[in-house]
Image (cartoon, rainbow, N blue to C red):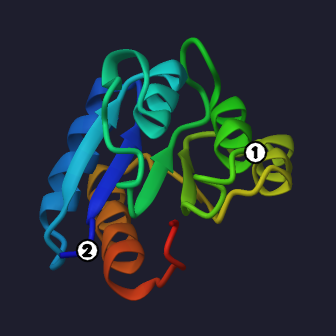
């Protein structure tokens, strides 16, 4: 069966909880791995550190990446993912509260597939993440990574 893993990179515990609840409501079965900082996200993607030995041929179907993260920010994580041929095609959605034009430009300039502002309203946030999950797991197609 195709890998239906989502890597959620989120340091805000409330946003993490809402995203996890929303992703459970998608019509597509999925597994969510949570990384709480940029360093942990890259360890998961590249199978080192805390995730040493993880089969890196099994990459997430999509990465939901916050921009404002401890240790390494979202743009640094995105650059690392895009600069490695093993992960350069993994879809990355920037899911952030930032509405700064420069963040939007930096995201797309560094290879983001999408840039989504997190709504402040609880119900809107849940619905948005649910729709994102359904689209990236059920509708979108990506080439085989290996």
- Disc 2 target residue: 2
Viewer-nearest residue: 42 or 100? 42
- Considering only vertical position in the picture, is 35 above or below 83? above
- Considering only vertical position in the picture, is 73 above or below 32? above
Quadrant of the image occupied by residue 4: bottom left
Tell me what residue is drawn at x 66 percent, y 56 percent: 88
- Considering only vertical position in the picture, is 31 above or below 136? above
Mark 2 nearby-residue class (10 Å; few <14, some 14–19, many ≥20)? few
Label ID, residue 83: 1
Q: Is residue 119 left or right of residue 31?
A: right
Percent coordinates x, y for residue 82 in the rendering:
71, 49
Tell me what residue is drawn at x 75 percent, y 57 percent: 111
Tell me what residue is drawn at x 30 percent, y 67 percent: 127
Label ID, residue 128: none
Tell me what residue is drawn at x 27 percent, y 31 percent: 14
Q: Is residue 18 left or right of residue 102?
A: left
Instruction: Please report whichever mark, 2 or 1, sits nearer to the chain's N-terminal start.
Output: 2
Q: Is residue 58 left or right of residue 18?
A: right
Q: Is residue 133 left or right of residue 86?
A: left
Mark 1 nearby-residue class (10 Å; few <14, some 14–19, many ≥20)? few
Viewer-nearest residue: 62 or 47? 47
- Which image quarter is the N terminus in? bottom left
Q: Element under label 2?
A: loop
Q: CA distance from mark 2 to mark 1?
A: 24 Å
Name of the residue lying farthest toward the top: 71
């Amino acid at each position: 069966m195709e890998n239906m893993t989502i890597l959620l990179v989120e340091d805000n515990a409330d946003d993490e909880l809402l995203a996890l609840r929303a992703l459970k409501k998608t019509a597509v079965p999925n597994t969510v791995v949570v990384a709480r900082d940029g360093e942990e996200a890259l360890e998961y993607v590249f199978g080192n550190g805390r995730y040493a030995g993880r089969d890196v041929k099994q990459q997430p179907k999509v990465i939901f990446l916050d921009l404002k993260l401890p240790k390494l920010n979202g743009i640094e994580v995105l650059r690392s993912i895009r600069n490695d041929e093993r992960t350069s095609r993994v879809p990355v959605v920037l899911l952030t509260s930032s509405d700064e034009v420069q963040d939007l430009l930096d995201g797309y300039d560094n290879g983001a597939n999408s840039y989504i502002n997190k709504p402040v309203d609880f119900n809107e946030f849940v619905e948005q993440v649910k729709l994102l999950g359904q689209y990236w797991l059920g509708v979108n197609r990506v080439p085989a990574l290996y």
